Amino acid sequence: MEHKLQIALSLLGNPVAPKDITQLLGVFPETSLLRGERRPELDLPRQNIWSVRSDGRLKTIDSQWEQLKRLFEQKWDVFVGISRRGTTKITIIVDATDRIPSIVIPCIMSKDAFSLNAEIDIDCYQ
């Protein structure tokens, strides 16, 4: 059973500008879009977007979540404060060639999602 896992951690519609979030956290996002920003190859975002993603090399949700948290080092509390000003979304991305594996949300991830006031979304692709 072959599959690939990734986790995305996104701030959506946050009043803090994406470039300011990057500066405050010292973390460079995979996606950073300012509401109304002009980018001809994309539709204009209807809200600010700031998002990081695990690299997908680790095999468990637990290890990938820890990888994402390590990005923030000592700034996790700052991230929690920023996250509560908008919508926070944790997306578990499962890309499977055969059967989709069972997905278990680790306790620490649930606890962190609660502190971030985040939704957890599971996207499965086959």
Image: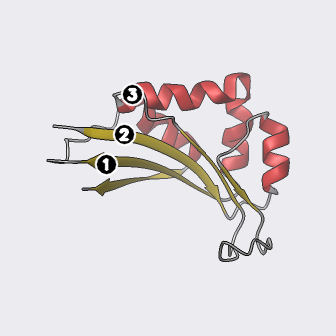
Q: Residue at x 68, y 75 (%)?
A: 46
Quarter of the image that includes the N terminus: top left
Q: Which residue is mark 1?
A: 95
Alpha-carbon neighbours of circle 3 within 10 Å: few (<14), some, or many (≥20)? Answer: some
Alpha-carbon neighbours of circle 1 within 10 Å: few (<14), some, or many (≥20)? Answer: some
Nearer-N-terminus badge (3/1)? 3
Nearer-N-terminus badge (2/1)? 2
Which color mode does the image show? secondary structure
The percent position of residue 17, horizontal first and vertical second, equals 82, 57
Which dot, 3 or 1, sits closer to the camera? 1
Q: Is residue 102 left or right of residue 65?
A: left
Front position in the image: 77 or 21: 21
- Residue sitting at the far front: 41
CA–CA distance in space, label 2 to label 1 = 7 Å
Give amino acid for label 1: Asp
CA–CA distance in space, label 3 to label 1 = 17 Å
Q: Residue at x 80, y 71 (%)?
A: 37
Give amino acid for label 2: Leu
Front position in the image: 30 or 110: 30
Q: Which residue is mark 2?
A: 5
The percent position of residue 102, horizontal first and vertical second, equals 19, 41
Image quadrant where residue 126 sits:
bottom left
Give amino acid for label 3: Asp
The percent position of residue 67, horizontal first and vertical second, equals 53, 26
Q: Are marks 3 and 2 in contact (CB under 8 Å)?
A: no
Q: Is residue 103 left or right of residue 86?
A: left
The percent position of residue 79, horizontal first and vertical second, equals 70, 39
Alpha-carbon neighbours of circle 2 within 10 Å: few (<14), some, or many (≥20)? Answer: some
Q: Are marks 2 and 1 in contact (CB under 8 Å)?
A: yes
Which dot, 3 or 2, sits closer to the camera? 2
Q: Residue at x 55, y 46 (%)?
A: 9
Q: Which residue is mark 3?
A: 62
